[in-house]
Amino acid sequence: MKLTGPQFSDATTQAFFDENGYVKVRLLTSEQAEQLRHAYDSVKSAHEKIAIPFITTSHSNDADLIGKVNEMILNVVKEPIYKIILNSNIIFSNFLVKRNGEDSESNPHQDLTIVDENKYLSYSVWVALEDVDVSNGAMRVLPRSHLFDFSLRPNPNYYWKYNAVMDEIKKDMADCPAKKGEALIFAHSLIHGSHKNLSGRHRLACVVSLHPREAELYNFFLDAPESKYVKKYKMSVDAFIKYIKGKPPHFGELLEELPFSNRQISKEEYRAQYALVN
C-alpha cells in the first residue's frame, strides 16, 4: 500500500524517496548554512548546558527557547523546503548538537509516530551545517525499512521492537555523508542513526519535522513499558512546541486509548522482513 508522504517537485527525487524512504538533496547555499551557524551562537550556552551526548533544542523543555530556535531556523530553511516539497506543513525545527566523544553514537532507531501511518508518512529534513562524514558523526540509514510492517512508536516508555537485533541492523545500514548545506530527507518510520563524533569538537546540524498537509497530528503516550494500552492525543504545532519530554501532552486533546503490544523481533524475523523489501 502506497502511503502519502512528501511530494517532491523533482520526479527523480520522488522515485528515490518512495523506494528507499530517504533522499539527499542540496537545500541551502554555504552562506545560508553559515547564517544558521551564526544564529546558533546566540543560543549555544542554553544547548551545551544540557549534559547529554546528543542534544536537541527540545531537550531543554523550554518553550520560549524552542520557539525562538524554531523561528531562527525557519527564517532560513522554510522557503527552500517548500520549493522542493510541495504538499507539506512544517511542524517545528531544532538545532542538533552531537558532542565529541565515544558515547556520541546514535544507535539505530525510528522516530515517534505522529500521524496515522496506515495512510501517511511524516518526515524530517536533516540539514548539515558543516561538512559531515563518519569521523564527526555522519547519518546512516537502513534503506527501505519504511516498508517494514507498521508498528506504533509511542513515547516515552517504549522499548523498541528491534532492540534485540540492533547489531544485525547495523550490518545493513548505509552511510550518508553530507556537505555543508545538504539535507537528508527521511521518513520518521525509516530506521536511522549516526556514527560517533570523534573529530575533537562538537558537530552542529538542524532538523525540521514535516507532515502531509491533510494528515492530522498525534502524540501516542505510553504510561509504562508494560502498559497494554497507549493514549492517543490530537496535537497542534503549538502543542508540539510546548511539549515537555516524558510527560503527557498538556496541550494535546486525549482522543482514546488503544491496545498496544510491545513484542520483540527475533533475528530470524528481522532477516525475513529485510529480505521481503530488498
Image: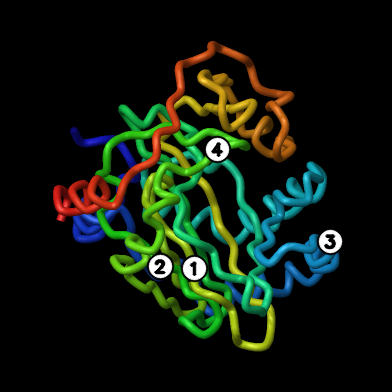
> How much space separates mark 1 and mark 2, taking CA atoms?
5 Å
Residue 64: image location, x then y, percent: 82, 45
Q: Residue at x 70, y 37 (%)?
A: 246
> How much space separates mark 1 and mark 4, taking CA atoms?
20 Å
Task: Classify 10 Å Cα crowding around label 4: few (below 14), some (14-19), many (20 and above).
Answer: some
Question: Which badge, 4 or 2, comes first in the chain's sequence?
Answer: 2
> How much space separates mark 3 and mark 1, taking CA atoms?
23 Å
Q: Residue at x 42, y 41 (%)?
A: 122
Question: Which badge, 2 or 3, comes first in the chain's sequence?
Answer: 3
Question: Which badge, 3 or 4, comes first in the chain's sequence?
Answer: 3
Residue 47: image location, x then y, percent: 78, 62
Looking at this view, is 68 or 2 the one in front?
2
The circle drawn on residue 140 is 2
Residue 50: image location, x then y, percent: 80, 60
Write down the residue under mark 4: 158
Q: Label 2 near label 4: C-beta < 8 Å?
A: no
Give amino acid for label 3: Ala
Asked which quadrant contains residue 230, the reply is top right
Q: Is residue 77 left or right of residue 103?
A: left
Question: Which badge, 3 or 1, comes first in the chain's sequence?
Answer: 3
Secondary structure under the numbered disc 2 in the rendered image: strand
| Rendered position, 191 above or below 132 | above
Write down the residue under mark 1: 194
Colouring scheme applied when the structure was drawn: rainbow
Secondary structure under the numbered disc 3 in the rendered image: helix
Write down the residue under mark 3: 46
Looking at this view, is 208 or 30 the one in front?
208
Q: Nearer the viewer, mark 2 or mark 3?
A: 2
Q: Nearer the viewer, mark 3 or mark 1?
A: 1
